[in-house]
């Protein structure tokens, strides 16, 4: 059984441009819920146990190559001469290992139909093998089959051909069962059938679909597997289509979380990528975007208008109108409103990070309070520290970045500047407005006060100098009397 599994391959067609998308990237790289459609197709293969994959690239091939980053084999289709021609470019990949697995099978898929699912892939393979087919077309029934290849069945119900919409008669166009663009082939038969394709049709393309009639003409078996999931057909030819795919996927993902006990009072503006996990009892509020494998624990409140991207978020966390990237937020932390947590940060349990605070590449200890208007960068802040408004860790001198360390139980006065590298021990106090340029020992106070000079009547003198009009003068002096 294992040897058979290993002989399953997949070829994903990703050569097309998608002219109607009006952008200079290959169509399969357009994103649905944050991931290129190509990635959806790849992950369906992987989830079905197929990882021997060849991606056929064409238009802007370098972008496909860059995206794949060497994860899979690729084949170049230098000109777009049809889906059959695209698969021909993968023949060397198909031939690899064929001698050892003469009955191996290959799944051919479109890189721009993201909702192909592993169940359909696996069940269609079972049918394909049971019937000893050379080709098994994966089909579905649509209310509106316009534009798709129609599945033509003969009297006994077995498939006899696929006819493209443009080539079809009115009678054939009335058929609602369509070709999904995904098929299983016995690899050896595929290679043979590709060799016989011609471009004798309306579009002058080499149609992969002609392999069905080709197989039958050769006396081989051809079959169809009708999927119960019509979504497998859906692709995007335009930005409007792409928006529809996104909306469908978005609600599917939200639906899954609803089933798992996540609360959504309203789904407006909520985008949750499929790699995201959310614990029971958590609530996601409008305008919240959860991306790239973010995990959210139990009983959290995330949102409104928040972004968490690549984050690990514990239980009972609140994130309100804030953005958090590649960071860890531990249990019970309260973030926001208006906080920006940049990568490589760790906010420990029960810490409170308040409005207009930016944290970067820093660790913030348990129950530490950073309530407003602070920048903490490249720093290690201990537990139960209080950082006053306006404090800045001055981590960059124009050449190098350096770290600040603030010990447990320290109290950093408002508008403190900590000139990195600098270490503050435990329980240190800094007076408001101080600029700390050297390390401070535990339990010390840093204070740097010049003498405060007070000049009486300064404003009144200034008014005369400015030759201020009497009305304004009166107003100022009247207010003064009121005080
Ligand atoms: C194809 C099928 C049609 C099916 C439909 C499902 C053929 C002839 N027709 O039609 O029966 O109902 O898919 O969506 O196969 N591609 C290349 N190189 C090419 C041409 C296409 O790589 O030269 C790629 C495209 O990027 C795309 C896929 O193949 O990912 C399908 O091509 P597309 O032009 O969209 O096929 P359709 O005409 O829609
Ligand atoms: Ca086409």
Image (cartoon, rainbow, N blue to C red):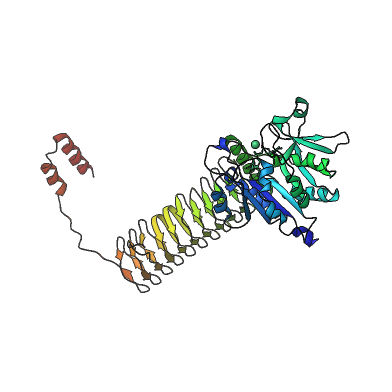
Query: In which quadrant will I find the N terminus?
Result: bottom right
Picture residue at 74% right of the left edge, 59% below the top:
6
In the rendered image of this protein, does residue 341 appear above or below residue 231?
A: below
- Find residue 151 and report its horizontal and vertical position in percent: 77, 36
Asked if residue 262 shows in the view, the reply is no
- Left or right of residue 275, residue 105 in this image: right
- Left or right of residue 216, residue 256 in this image: left
- Find residue 410 and report its horizontal and vertical position in percent: 40, 67
- Left or right of residue 114, residue 65 in this image: left
- Find residue 66 and report its horizontal and vertical position in percent: 54, 53
- Find residue 15 and report its horizontal and vertical position in percent: 61, 44
Query: In which quadrant will I find the C terminus?
Result: top left
Depth order, front residue of 104/397: 104
Asked if residue 162 shows in the view, the reply is yes
Picture residue at 64% right of the left edge, 40% below the top:
81
Q: For the view shown, which residue lies furthest in the bottom direction?
A: 441
Give the total number of marks visible in the rendering.
0
- Left or right of residue 103, residue 25 in this image: left
Picture residue at 15% right of the left edge, 49% below the top:
458
Q: For the view shown, which residue lies furthest in the right direction?
A: 156
Depth order, front residue of 119/309: 119
Picture residue at 76% right of the left edge, 58% below the top:
5
> Which of the four quarters of the rendered structure image does ligand 2 lie in?
top right
Depth order, front residue of 131/314: 131
């Amino acid at each position: 059984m294992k040897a058979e599994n290993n002989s399953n391959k997949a070829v994903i067609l990703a050569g097309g441009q998608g002219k109607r998308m009006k952008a200079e990237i290959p169509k399969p790289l357009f994103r649905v819920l944050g991931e290129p459609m190509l990635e959806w197709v790849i992950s369906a293969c992987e989830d079905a146990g197929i990882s021997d994959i060849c991606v056929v690239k064409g238009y802007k091939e370098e972008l496909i190559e860059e995206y794949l980053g060497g994860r899979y084999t690729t084949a170049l289709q230098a000109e777009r001469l049809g889906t059959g021609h695209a698969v021909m470019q993968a023949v060397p990949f198909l031939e690899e290992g064929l001698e050892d697995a003469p009955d191996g099978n290959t799944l051919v898929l479109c890189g721009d139909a993201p909702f192909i699912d592993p169940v359909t892939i696996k069940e269609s393979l079972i049918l394909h093998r049971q019937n000893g087919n050379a080709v098994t077309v994966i089909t579905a029934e649509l209310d509106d089959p316009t534009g798709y290849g129609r599945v033509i069945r003969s009297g006994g119900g077995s498939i006899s051909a696929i006819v493209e919409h443009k080539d079809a008669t009115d009678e054939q166009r009335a058929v609602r069962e369509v070709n999904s663009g995904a098929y299983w082939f016995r690899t050896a038969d595929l290679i043979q059938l590709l060799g016989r394709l011609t471009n004798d049709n309306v579009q002058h393309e080499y149609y992969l679909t002609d392999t069905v009639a080709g197989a039958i003409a050769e006396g081989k078996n051809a079959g169809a597997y009708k999927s119960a999931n019509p979504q497998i057909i859906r692709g995007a030819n335009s930005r409007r289509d792409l928006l529809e795919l996104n909306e469908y996927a978005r609600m599917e993902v939200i639906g899954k979380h609803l089933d798992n006990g996540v609360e959504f009072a309203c789904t407006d503006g909520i985008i949750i990528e499929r790699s995201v996990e959310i614990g029971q009892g958590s609530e996601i509020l409008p305008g919240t975007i959860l991306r790239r494998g973010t995990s959210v624990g139990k009983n959290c409140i995330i949102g409104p208008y928040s972004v968490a991207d690549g984050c690990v978020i514990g239980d009972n966390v609140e994130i309100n109108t804030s953005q958090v990237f590649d960071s860890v937020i531990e249990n019970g932390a309260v973030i926001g409103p208006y906080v920006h947590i940049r990568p490589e940060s760790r906010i420990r349990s029960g810490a409170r990070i308040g409005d207009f605070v930016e944290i970067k590449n820093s660790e913030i200890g348990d129950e530490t309070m950073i309530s407003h208007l602070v920048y903490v960068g490249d720093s290690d802040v201990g537990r139960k520290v209080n950082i006053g408004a306006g404090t800045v860790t001055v981590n960059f001198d124009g050449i190098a970045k350096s770290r600040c360390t603030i010990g447990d139980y320290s109290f950093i006065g408002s508008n403190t500047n900590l000139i990195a590298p600098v270490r503050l021990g435990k329980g240190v106090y800094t007076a408001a407005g101080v600029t700390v340029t050297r390390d401070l020992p535990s339990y010390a106070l840093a204070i740097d006060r010049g003498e405060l000079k007070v000049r009486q009547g300064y404003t009144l003198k200034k008014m005369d100098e400015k030759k201020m009009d009497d009305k304004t003068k009166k107003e100022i002096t009247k207010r003064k009397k009121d005080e």
